[in-house]
Image (cartoon, helix red, strand yellow):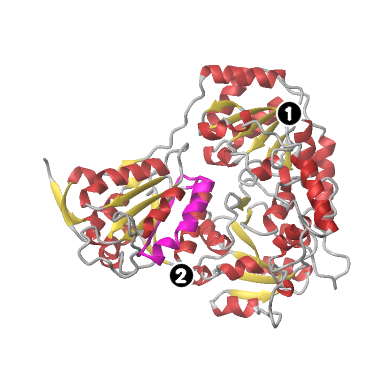
């Protein structure tokens, strides 16, 4: 059998994780976020304490927000490194389900080690145990099954010999990347086993780069040669592949305009002449004009979410090409598939196309759009009016340089930032696959851990701040500096606008339209300061610009609160910006406003591309 080492199952897990390496010589699992309870404190807690800095443990304030930080870290590292999160059984584990779904939708690696009930069942039912009357094998952790890429319940120590390598295989697989849940029975964590010493030998995990099939490559090259007005849709896969230079070179050589998804934004800096901006529902006038005129749409590393495609109305009858490492995504919308790593595919297409150049898009579209953005984001002439989100974005843009990363997740700001923020390379971080309120502050902390060399600006609305803000304490404790721009429009302003845009009346979104006795007067400055952050209220756009500059010198988070108007949307006042979004409108209603909205809905729905 060879040499063995006697360890508990939990001790074996952390020892194994500590020697799983990247090609760059770093640990793939950077460390473990932990909140301990009776499902993980005695077993895994003891093991993490014992291994010390070889696999560091960090304390957070909420299981979901700890996982958000880990996910943002992995995104900031372009999926080349990840972090783990552990919880106790019961609410500790189910708090992680939302974060698991977020990682799953965004195709990001996350290792969840969730405490579980006793495998022996001797003390059942234990505290916090969920019992299924008809299935004795079920626990609360079965909630993870639909929202992770790999699920395994560890009911014997030796299960780790296969479960751990499978977990890392999933997280390092570019086609199948996503969250993993190891549901670790609490008694098994503490059980001893004689482990093969070879199990703990360091291992390097190489992220593969699949090359394209020759026939698929030839077909796609032929479609590009034949196209009169091709356009490239750049998704997050461009960044995860490290294909930014290849994309810039390909687009320039072939004279093909590039338009961006939320995940793909900043794969090309906004200054690149082939970058025509954001596409779709929250897209620029330039990008959407190019998309509507296209006869060939080349999606690279995108899953073609409804915001990207204008709910399947933006691209008309154009032929579709899907370049993606995941066949499921490559074939969407009836696309001709080119299944390959984005960088390898672009390099192969460059060779296959010779000196071919497309007619290209009108540069005046791009220039006109950028001029409109500058005007729209300019400081308000009347300093007494509440600023718009666009004016807030403009202030931050003017106060930062190309090294700044704007990040956000939910509400109005994601659409406004996609439309208006002009990033340098990698200057944009958006969680918009799941658009999870509460991601922002924890995500900013994780992003800063991944990119300590960059200035991180976290845009968050008052509604999202109220949902999850406690990791400010963690960032203060660990001296992780980033800047939070908290826009207060006194409620859920984004959904208030959507509600009215789909024929409804203002109801239950802004505080003033809710069933309340008193309008809340929330002192966000005092709240953030009570957690140790530097907090200040900006009374104007000019003050916001100044405070952004001052914040840069601190070693703790800075929260800058500014009151904004709840009225205008991100594209209001920008001719041609934005596109239709399919949000179902009631077919029956009493108001003329609702009937008009439904008629408009039917007209747009009739244009939807239904090819799958």
- The residue wearing badge 2 is 61
Q: Judge by depth and name the residue closer to the eye, 171 or 304.
A: 304
Label 1 sits on a secondary structure element that is loop
**Count of numbered circles on the image:** 2
In the rendered image of this protein, does residue 496 appear above or below residue 366? below
Between 461 and 26, the one nearer to me in the picture: 461
In the picture, the quarter occupied by the C terminus is top right
Upstream in sequence: badge 2 or badge 1? 2
Which of the numbered marks, if any, corresponds to residue 317?
1
**Quarter holding residue 570:** bottom right
Query: Residue 409 in the image: x percent, y percent?
Result: 61, 57
The residue sitting at 53% across, 63% down in the picture is: 442
Mark 2 lies on a secondary structure that is loop
Q: Which mark is residue 171?
A: none
- Other residues around mark 2 within 10 Å, as few (<14) / some (14–19) / many (≥20): some
Q: Are marks 2 and 1 in contact (CB under 8 Å)?
A: no
- Residue drawn at x 76%, y 22% is 228
> Residue 99: within the magenta?
yes
Q: Picture coordinates of residue 540 (x, y %)?
A: 78, 71
* Residue 385 found in image quarter: bottom right
Q: Residue furthest bottom?
A: 518
**Which residue appears farthest toward the right when viewing the image?**
381
> Does the rendering let one see residue 398?
no
Between 169 and 331, which is closer to the camera in this rendering? 331
User: Residue drawn at (45%, 48%), measured in percent from left and top?
Assistant: 146
Q: Nearer the viewer, residue 385 or 344?
A: 385
Name the spot of residue 484 as percent of width and height, x first: 62, 66
Q: Which residue range is magenta in the image?
A: 79-108
């Amino acid at each position: 059998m060879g040499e063995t080492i006697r360890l508990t199952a939990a001790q074996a897990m952390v020892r194994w994780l500590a020697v799983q390496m990247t090609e760059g010589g770093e640990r793939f699992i950077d460390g473990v976020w932990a909140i301990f309870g009776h499902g993980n404190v005695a077993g895994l807690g003891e093991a993490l304490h014992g291994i010390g800095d070889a696999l560091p443990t960090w304390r957070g304030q909420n299981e979901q927000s700890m996982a958000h930080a880990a996910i943002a870290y992995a995104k900031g590292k372009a999926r080349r490194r990840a972090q783990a999160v552990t919880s106790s059984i019961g609410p500790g584990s189910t708090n992680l389900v939302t974060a698991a779904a977020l990682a799953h939708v965004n195709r990001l690696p996350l290792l969840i080690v969730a405490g579980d009930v006793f495998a022996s069942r001797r003390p059942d039912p234990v505290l916090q145990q969920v019992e299924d009357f008809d299935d004795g094998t079920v626990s609360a952790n079965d909630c993870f099954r639909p929202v992770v890429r790999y699920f395994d319940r560890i009911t014997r120590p030796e299960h780790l010999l296969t479960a751990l390598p499978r977990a890392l295989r999933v997280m390092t697989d570019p086609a199948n990347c996503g969250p993993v849940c190891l549901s670790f029975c609490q008694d098994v964590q503490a059980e001893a086993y004689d482990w093969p010493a070879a199990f703990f030998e360091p291992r390097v995990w190489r992220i593969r780069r699949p090359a394209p099939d020759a026939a698929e490559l030839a077909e796609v090259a032929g479609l590009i040669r034949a196209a009169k007005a091709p356009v490239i849709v750049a998704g997050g896969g461009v960044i995860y592949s490290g294909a930014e230079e290849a994309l810039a070179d390909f687009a320039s050589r072939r004279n093909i305009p590039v338009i961006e998804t939320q995940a793909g934004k900043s794969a090309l800096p906004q200054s690149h002449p082939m970058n025509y901006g954001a596409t779709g529902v929250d897209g620029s006038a330039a990008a959407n004009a190019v998309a509507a005129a296209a006869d060939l749409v080349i999606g690279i590393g995108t899953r073609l979410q409804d915001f990207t495609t204008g709910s399947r109305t933006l691209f008309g009858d154009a032929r579709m090409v899907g370049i993606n490492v995941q066949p499921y995504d490559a074939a969407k919308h009836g696309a001709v598939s080119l299944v390959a790593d984005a960088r390898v595919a672009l390099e192969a297409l460059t060779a296959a196309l010779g000196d071919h150049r497309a007619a290209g898009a009108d540069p005046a579209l791009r220039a006109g759009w950028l001029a409109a953005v500058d005007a729209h984001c300019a400081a308000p002439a009347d300093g007494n009016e509440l600023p718009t989100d666009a004016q807030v974005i403009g202030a931050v843009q003017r106060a930062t340089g190309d090294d700044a990363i704007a990040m956000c997740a939910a509400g109005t700001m994601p659409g406004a930032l996609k439309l208006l923020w002009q990033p340098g390379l990698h200057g944009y971080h958006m969680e918009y696959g799941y658009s999870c309120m509460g991601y922002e502050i924890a995500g900013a902390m994780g992003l800063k851990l991944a990119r300590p060399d960059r200035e991180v600006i976290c845009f968050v609305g008052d509604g999202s701040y109220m949902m999850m803000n406690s990791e400010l304490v963690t960032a203060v404790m660990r001296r992780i500096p980033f800047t939070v721009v908290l826009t207060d429009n006194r409620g859920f302003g984004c959904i208030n606008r959507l509600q009215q845009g789909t024929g409804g009346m203002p109801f239950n979104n802004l505080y003033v339209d809710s069933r309340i006795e008193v309008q809340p007067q929330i002192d966000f400055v005092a709240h953030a300061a009570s957690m140790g952050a530097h907090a200040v209220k900006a009374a104007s756009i000019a003050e916001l610009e100044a405070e952004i500059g001052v914040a840069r010198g601190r070693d703790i988070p800075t929260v800058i609160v500014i009151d904004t108007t709840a009225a205008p949307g991100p594209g209001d006042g920008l001719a041609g910006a934005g596109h239709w979004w399919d949000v179902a409108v009631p077919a029956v209603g009493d108001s003329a406003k609702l009937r008009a909205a439904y008629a408009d809905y039917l007209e747009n729905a009739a244009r939807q591309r239904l090819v799958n």
